[in-house]
Image (cartoon, grey):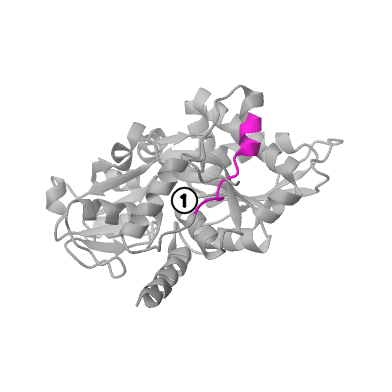
Amino acid sequence: MRNRGRAAATVLVLLALLCACGYGSRREQGYDQAPVAAGAKRTDGLDAVTIGYFPNLTHATALVGVERGLLQRELGGTRLRTAVFNAGPSEIEALNSGSIDMGWIGPSPTVNSYVVSGGRSLRIVSGSASGGVKLVVDPRKIKSPGDLRGRRIATPQLGNSQDVAFLNWIAERGWKVDPQSGRGDVSVVRTDNRITPDAFRSGAIDGAWVPEPTASKLVAEGGRVLLDESALWPDHRFVITNLVVSQRFLAAHPEAVEAVLRGSVRTNAWINAHPDAARATANAALRRLSGKALPPDVLDPAFRSIRVTDDPLAATLAVQAEHAVRAGLLDRPELRGIYDLAPLRRVLAAEGGPTVDDAGLGIR
C-alpha cells in the first residue's frame, strides 16, 4: 500500500510538472539577441548566454533587465540571448535540454524539476519577486470568505503555486476538496490565465486565486480583492519568482552565472529606486513581446503589488512545498541542495547589500 501511494504521488509530481505555473500555451517565442559592444571582452570565454523568462509582471527583473540592457552590460562581449516562455514546463524542458542556461521561473516548476530529477537538474541562485497573488471574487455573489462555499473558483493549473496555496487555504478553513478533480465544498476550476477574465465576465467562475496581472484584470472587470496572499505570510513576503540555472552550466561557467546575477541585483536596485520608470519599462517590454501593453487600470495596481527582491525567501519555498504535501499533490520532497547562494552572496557583498539565507536547503 505504501509503495502504491508513493507511486501515485510520483505520478502527481509529474502531472504537476506538466501543469505548473502555466500562463498560456507551451509554445516559446523563439530566441532574441541583445547587441554587444564592439571590442568588449567575453565572459567565461562564452559567445552567448541564453536566459528564459515569461512575459509577466512577476518576471519584472527579466523584463526590465533585458529592456534596459542591464543584463547585457554585465556580460560584456558575451551575447545575451533570450527565450520567452508562456508556461513553466516548457521552460524547464529547455533548461534540462540545454536550450537555455538560466531562467526566471516560479517555485512549483522549480521544486518539481528538482524532485523528479533526483536533485540533479537545477539550482536556485537568486530570488526575483515576492507577492502579486490575489483572490478576486464577484462581489454580487461573494462578500466574505464564508461565501466561497459552493462557489466555482479558478486557479491557473493543477499543482501550480496558486493552486497549492488555494487548496491549503481551503483546508485550513476545514473544507474538503479532492485535489485532483477540484470537486468538494468549493469547486476549484483549473483555468488558463489567458481565458480567466472571459470566464469571470461570463459568470462561468465566481472568482479566482491568480497572479498579477490577471488579478487586476479581474478587478477591472468588476471583481473585488477578497484576499491578498501576502497577508498570509510573515512580513507579507513569499516567493513567486526565482532565478535558476542548470547544474551543468553552473559547474562549467561560474563567471557567466555571476555576471547574470550581478545584472539581476543591479536591475532590482534600479527598479526599487525608479518605480515609475520601471513600471513603464516593464510595460514597454510586454508591448514588444506580446504586441499589447497593459492599460493603466491594470498595470498600476498589478505592479504595486509585486516586490522585486534578491532574497530567494527560501523558508517560504519550504512552506509552499509542505502545503503541496498536505494537499496530497506531492510526496514529501528532499529539497536540500536546491539552493546555491554562494555566487549571489559574493555579488551582494561587492554591491554592499545584505546577505541571504537558504533556510538549510543549500548545497553542502
* Total labels drawn: 1
Q: Is residue 91 left or right of residue 325?
A: right
Image quarter (top left, top right, bottom left or bottom right) of the N terminus: bottom left
Q: Is residue 285 magenta?
A: no
Q: In this view, does 6 lie to the left or right of 43?
A: left
Q: Is residue 30 left or right of residue 298?
A: right
Image location (x, y in percent) of residue 90: 55, 62
Residue located 19% across and 60% down the image: 186
Q: Which residue type does callout 1 highlight? A: Pro
Answer above or below: position of 115 versus 79.
Answer: below
Would residue 44 be visible to someone looking at this image? yes
Answer above or below: position of 235 versus 330.
Answer: above
* Highlighted range, magenta: 335-347
Image location (x, y in percent) of residue 216: 33, 43
- Element at badge 1? helix
Answer above or below: position of 353 versus 49.
Answer: above
| Mark 1 nearby-residue class (10 Å; few <14, some 14–19, many ≥20) | many
- Residue 256, by quadrant, is top right
Residue located 46% across and 60% down the image: 24
Residue located 46% across and 39% down the image: 313
In this rendered view, identify the residue nearer to me: 197 or 326: 326
Q: Is residue 294 left or right of residue 182?
A: right
Answer above or below: position of 179 versus 286.
Answer: below
Image location (x, y in percent) of residue 200: 26, 56
In this rendered view, identify the residue nearer to me: 275 or 235: 235
Q: Mark 1 points at which residue?
A: 107
Looking at the image, which residue sits at the far right?
39
Would residue 293 be visible to someone looking at this image? no
Q: Does the magenta stretch include residue 344?
A: yes
Image location (x, y in percent) of residue 39: 87, 36
